[in-house]
Amino acid sequence: MLMIKAIVRPEKTTQILSELSDGGFPAVTKIEVVGRGKQRGVKVGEIHYDEIPKDMLLLVVNDESKEDLINIIMKNAKTGEKGAFGDGKIFVSEVSEAYTISSNTKGL
């Protein structure tokens, strides 16, 4: 099992969630976060914004679903044809175990 963490622009989240659901990935956790990437924030005029609002999407999937899931997120999170700074980042981590609390079952 893998955990996919995607940090994306908030204005892209609705489209990403819709495409994930249509692609067979309805289970997702969304968290509103703030942060900055390599660009160290954004400067607009004389104002420097150090904390930029983003959404973090968390999904746990079987290993064989990784490429499909990442492709859906990449396609729908990108700004324009080439993308832009601040479009986000995707992290992939191993998950050793998962449990469903209501049914006391192990696994996805």
Image (tube, rainbow, N blue to C red):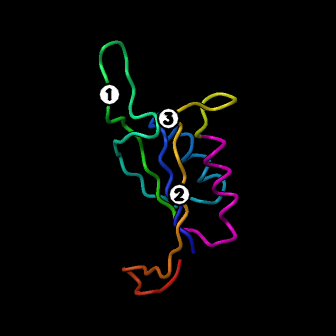
* Residue bearing mark 2: 91
Q: Which residues are drawn in magenta? A: 60-76
> The residue under label 3 is which amino acid type?
Gly
In the foreground, 69 or 100? 69
On screen, residue 76 above or below 63: above
Could you tell whether 4 is left or right of 22 in the image?
left
Q: Main secondary structure of the magenta part?
A: helix
Q: CA distance from mark 3 to mark 1?
A: 13 Å
Look at 38% across and 32% down and name the residue there.
41
Q: Which mark is residue 49?
A: 1
Look at 32% across and 28% down and name the residue there.
49
> The residue under label 1 is which amino acid type?
Tyr
Callout 2: SS: strand
* Residue bearing mark 3: 86
Could you tell whether 82 is left or right of 37 in the image?
right
Callout 3: SS: loop
Q: CA distance from mark 1 to mark 2?
A: 24 Å
Residue 90, given in percent of the width and then of the height, sits at: 55, 52
Q: Is residue 64 highlighted in magenta?
A: yes
Callout 1: SS: strand
> The residue under label 2 is which amino acid type?
Phe
**Label whose residue precedes the other's in the sequence (1 or 2):** 1
Residue 15, given in percent of the width and then of the height, sits at: 56, 40
Query: Pointer 3 and pointer 1: residues touching (CB < 8 Å)?
Result: no
Residue 96, given in percent of the width and then of the height, sits at: 50, 81
**Label whose residue precedes the other's in the sequence (3 or 1):** 1
Look at 69% across and 60% down and name the residue there.
67
Quadrant of the snapshot with the N terminus: bottom right
